[in-house]
Structures are given as structure tokens and as C-alpha cells.
Image: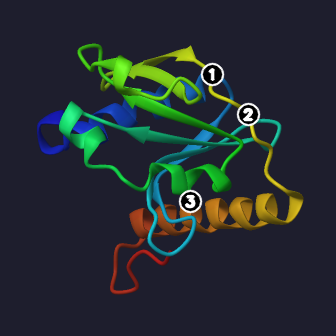
Amino acid sequence: MNEFRQPGQILARGVCRHLRSHGFVSVEELVPTRGLRVDVMALGPGGEIWVIECKSSRGDFLADSKWQGYLPWCDRFFWAVDADFPVDLLPDETGLMIADGYDAEILRFGTESRLPPARRKVMTQKFARHAASRLQALRDPGPGGVIM
């Protein structure tokens, strides 16, 4: 199954599995606001919202000029990379996960910046609509498609 996935999608799978073991639920490719699309957004048991960006190579990281735009949309921000990634490139104030297609490990928690209540409500609703839309599309992949 992994042979049909992009490297970042393989990392996202391991990240989502690992987060589930900590009581988080997650969705992939959520749009918090126009012009941004996060690789993984996770909703924790206490309502915390984490964003995880999956980077498969040095070039992938260096080409990402939008990552700081994700910070206002989450309580914590993480990078997910594989074991061969040059982690010295990643900013120290951000979280770090080492992942593969089957699991991940949190090596570092980045700075926590709690969302204001109004933004948390918006993001929780977007998360719920995104998840429900994906589930509906799996059950009925007809002409309605996925609504984000």
C-alpha cells in the first residue's frame, strides 16, 4: 500500500498512528485558512490542537516558506521527519517527531502557544467538518465529493 503514497504521506500515516496512542485524533491536509494546508492536524483529549508538518527531505524543508503561517492555528507545532533527515535544519523552538509509515516518536516538544477561545472554536469546527466530510466521502464517493 505504501508504494502508492508520497513520502510525506507515509510519514503522516506513522504520525497519526502514534498520536492515536496518546488519545489524539487526526486529519490530513486540513486548510486552516486560505493559502495554507497543514499535513496533519491533531485534536487532543483536552481539546488541544497540534499541527504537524511532514518533511521528506532537505529540499522539501527548504522549499517550505509558509510554515510560520501555521503557528497562529495551533497550540503546538511539530515537524515530522524520517531518521535520515538533517534535524539541525529545524528551528529549536518547534517540536520534532521522527516517523516512518508505521509509527513515530516525539523527540522534542516545541513552544506551546494556546489558541484564543474564539480561534479554538473555529478550528475545532473545521476539524469536525473536515473529518465528517472525509468519512462521508468514504461511505458515499458519489458526485458530491469531499466538502471542505
Q: Secondary structure at mark 1?
A: loop
Q: Residue at x 74, y 67 (%)?
A: 122
Q: Secondary structure at mark 3?
A: helix
Quick check: marks 2 and 1 in contact, CB under 8 Å?
A: yes
**Residue 139 horizontal side relative to residue 141, left or right:** right
Q: Residue at x 31, y 22 (%)?
A: 100
The residue lying furthest to the bottom in this view is 143
Badge 2 crowding class, 10 Å Cα cut-off, few under 14, some 14 to 19, many 20 or more, is some
Residue that badge 2 annotates:
112
Residue that badge 3 annotates:
131
Q: Quadrant of residue 90?
A: top left
Name the kind of residue labelled 2 in the image. Answer: Glu
Q: Residue at x 66, y 55 (%)?
A: 72
**Residue 134 horizontal side relative to residue 76, left or right:** left
144 or 125: nearer the viewer: 125
Which of the numbered marks, if any, corresponds to residue 109? Answer: 1
